[in-house]
Image (cartoon, coloured by chain):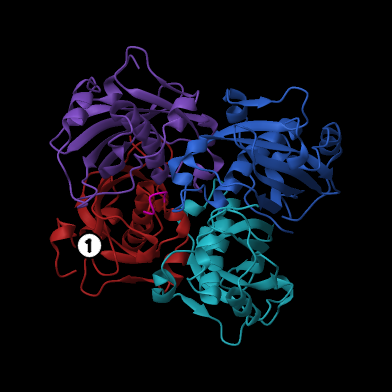
Chain colours: A blue, B cyan, C purple, D red
Amino acid sequence: MGEASARLSEPRARFLSSGVTSRQEGSDVHEKRIEIRWSDMDAFGHVNNATYLTFLEEVRDEWVERTLGEADLSDFVLARVAIDYRRELRQADDLVVARCGLAEVGRSSVHTREELRTVDGELAASATSVLVARDPATGRARGLTDGERSALLAEPLAPPDGDASGAR
Amino acid sequence: MGEASARLSEPRARFLSSGVTSRQEGSDVHEKRIEIRWSDMDAFGHVNNATYLTFLEEVRDEWVERTLGEADLSDFVLARVAIDYRRELRQADDLVVARCGLAEVGRSSVHTREELRTVDGELAASATSVLVARDPATGRARGLTDGERSALLAEPLAPPDGDASGAR
Amino acid sequence: MGEASARLSEPRARFLSSGVTSRQEGSDVHEKRIEIRWSDMDAFGHVNNATYLTFLEEVRDEWVERTLGEADLSDFVLARVAIDYRRELRQADDLVVARCGLAEVGRSSVHTREELRTVDGELAASATSVLVARDPATGRARGLTDGERSALLAEPLAPPDGDASGAR
Amino acid sequence: MGEASARLSEPRARFLSSGVTSRQEGSDVHEKRIEIRWSDMDAFGHVNNATYLTFLEEVRDEWVERTLGEADLSDFVLARVAIDYRRELRQADDLVVARCGLAEVGRSSVHTREELRTVDGELAASATSVLVARDPATGRARGLTDGERSALLAEPLAPPDGDASGAR
């Protein structure tokens, strides 16, 4: 089973205490504003492509915590990310608005739809990711629990094309 | 046109002088051994998922330099990466063996196939990436030049499934 | 002349637009709240020691911009950092409160006093840094201009011991 | 007691298996060649100042493992780093030669002397660091054990000024 370093067992302190995070009103996605750091830049003066995944991770982890709570989280692993880069990000952009929402629920997997935008709403990247539930005893994929599944099914689906969503 | 921080205009010094980089004999892929750093790890003791893209960038940039030379490189941008995480990497893995090869040549794009393996050959991740040629004057995609196209077409295709390639 | 990657020529957009940055009332230091990222952590679950310097850089750059403006900034380089680590930072700490103020003005150098605290005020690190003015034509140290010197001398000195400042 | 994320409990696999690491003949310092990554660069095209500490960490951790073994290592913490930046590092420098040696042994602390050089021997940075032994039960500083002390005292001192050592 594919896997990587998804963080899903941390205290919710960060999520709850951070004033810059908020659920959008009437929205199906979780939003987090992330400040760009000077060290995120590479020698072209753009945020490095790998750092885009750091931004996605920040919002995805919060979305998972919000949606699934902490109880069963420690054994989800990141199995896949597909990211389309649409716009360079620079120091002068200051902040990235990162969004994550549900795309699909599988037997043992959760598919999310994610995007990064500038404060002005320009799309910087769109992505889809796959998280897989893992049995801590065996290290292998396990089916989602009923509780996980119902929590996920209560979540509205994120729109299929982040770019087309003019309302956002 | 999608884009991100591909580095394609740096001097080849790094590539040429670094003893740890070599083209595999009789192989269609470029290989680079990358040492894992302690700071690559996250709090689960695994190399962070974003750092996998850093590893892919290291080998991809070398492959591009080897294949296309330096002349026309400064305006390729990274448009997409799709990565499947297969195995956690830890400090004890010490080194990652990163490979990059050609998957497909488009009108203005170059598709690569990439993978990360442990020294023992275990697949840690497989990926496909898309680079797009960009006109520096307009910042928009441009067709590949004849020189670029012939250099690319001289390159054998990377095997379609990194995982299935037992010989490697 | 010693030097490193101080960023002092970027547009002030980040500083000015970011709501999370503010000058403390009645204070001689510049303060910036920085959100901890999951990827800042290392395998012990603590923010990596090198990342502390990233946090210091974020607040120092803003302090320099605030104090010296943009005009003459592009050729200051970071010559030295001495940091005392006092407390581990974890994901659950959520935010770091970074502060930077003036310690001393030399002929061609600016000495700053910096600290990192938790939201609850616990000292995580204290540091002193030295920036040196550089002549872009020669790449060598140059004396501070009269304008730089008077802007700096208008700045109150940061208290000598960040730790002792109970009021903060 | 000051502290930060020193890694001292990892398996020695990395140190032992990595061909690029070697103890210098007739030398009192441990040397490690570290490849510069594209993502180490910042928007000025220089290795970011915080990344210098990552390079120092890489060589320091190996030196500690070599000198003290693994047995007692898990509870040393990094208490202080003072770094003088001497030269910018660029992608074209390809590799950094990092060195670490003993400077001083305290009651509960180990002081090291460290430096980063280009392959051509130019000094990029010199540093001193302080590691402190910590009692895992209390989290407080503890005296060095007899075994630690004798292992350290068998180690020759690193020369006091990295820059002056023309022979290196």
Vertical comparison of D16 with A129: above or below: below
Considering the whole magenta stretch, tell me its main secondary structure.
loop
Residue A111, image x and y in percent? Answer: 78, 46
Q: Which quadrant is the C terminus of chain D positioned in?
A: bottom left
Identity of the residue drawn at 59% across and 74% down: B148
Residue topped by disc 1: D155
Compared with C147, B140 (above or below) is below
**Horizontal relation, residue C16 to residue C139: left or right:** right
For the residue marked with disc 1, what is the amino acid? Answer: Glu
Q: Residue at x 52, y 68 (%)?
A: B72
Q: x%, y% of residue D138?
A: 41, 35
Magenta-colored span: D42-46
Q: Residue furthest bottom?
A: B26
Q: Secondary structure at mark 1?
A: loop
**Residue B96 visible in rendering:** no
Q: Nearer the viewer, residue B6 or C46?
A: B6
